[in-house]
Amino acid sequence: MTIEDLRLLTALAEAGSLAGAARRILVNHASAWRRLGALEQRLGARLFERSRTGYTPTPAGEEAIAVASRVVTELGELERRLAGQDIRLTGIVRLTTAETLLDLLVPILAELRHVHPGIVVELVTTNAFFTLTRRDADIALRPAASAPEGLVARRLAGVATAAYATADYLEDRTGIDPLALDWLAPDDSLAHLGSARWIAEHVEQDRIVHRSSTLMGLLAAARAGMGVAPLPCYLGDTDTTLRRVLPPVPEMASALFLLTHPDLRRMVRIRAVLDMLAARLTPYRRYFEGKAQK
């Protein structure tokens, strides 16, 4: 059994579906399917029951998952300890972030490339939290309500969220209660967001005319004049087509965190990336906190 097999087992146990497991270990669905089939054939045991609702471990699968989880965790800990001893300003740094931050982030990475040409940044753009404890990534730049336990966290700014729509959409709706307008809402995959909870509590279901699994999807729908979208102020306030319908809502607020694992924070190339990100993003604090309206 290879380490790739072990990682597939742990990913499948966590995700509950082959597609979700494939995304976690960064392979395509067909490769994950073939790898699982080959593993079960070699072992002569069925590890998962397949159904429409997902993959459920068999007794043999539960035993295999327990061993796989322990081995993957121990290997990850060894990698972090050894990596933390690296004092070179060269090598790969794996950085995960949300797509809403790309316009701010990529110019900083271009500067980093100029200043430290030996550092190669692998940028993983996803709305899901990668697990830093298993080295899915070395650094995370994430808006979140709070920093995850067990990680070294640097809070760069508060992140305010307000409601936005186009001027054309609002033109014929002057004086209408904002809650009675057409709303664009996060879907269930973003149910953890404060904006999703606020909409569920304050906006009638029949006023929700569109849902999206990403904030960039909500931004595009708002730009198209479909209705009112909750957006981080660093997106909404800098878009010339949008106007605030509601000011920043405290229940929607979060914070921007720069995260890494304790075992990696003294690694020279990790520290170089962390320091540049913090230095270049801190001046944008007013934009993140909704205090720099256009």
Image (cartoon, rainbow, N blue to C red):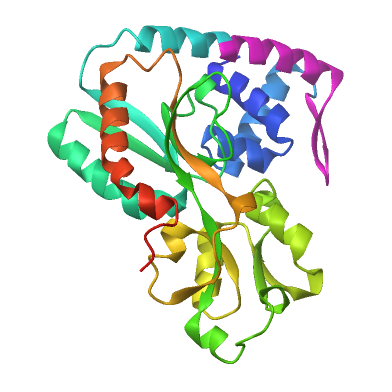
Q: In terms of image quadrants, where is residue 201? A: bottom right
Q: Residue at x 25, y 26 (%)?
A: 272
Q: Is residue 233 left or right of residue 192?
A: left
Q: Nearer the viewer, residue 21 or 156?
A: 156
Q: In terms of image quadrants, where is residue 97? A: top left
Residue 65 position, x and y percent, is 72, 18
Tell me the quarter of the image containing the C terminus: bottom left
Residue 266 position, x and y percent, is 32, 14
Q: Nearer the viewer, residue 8 or 131?
A: 131
Up the image or down, 67 lies above or below 174; here it is: above
Up the image or down, 6 lies above or below 278; here it is: above
Q: Residue at x 29, y 48 (%)?
A: 106
Residue segment shown in magenta: 47-73
What count of labels does the image hold?
0
Q: Residue at x 50, y 87 (%)?
A: 168
Residue 19 position, x and y percent, is 65, 43
Tell me the quarter of the image containing the N terminus: top right
Q: Is residue 155 left or right of residue 57?
A: left
Q: Is residue 25 within the magenta segment?
A: no
Up the image or down, 132 lies above or below 200; here it is: above
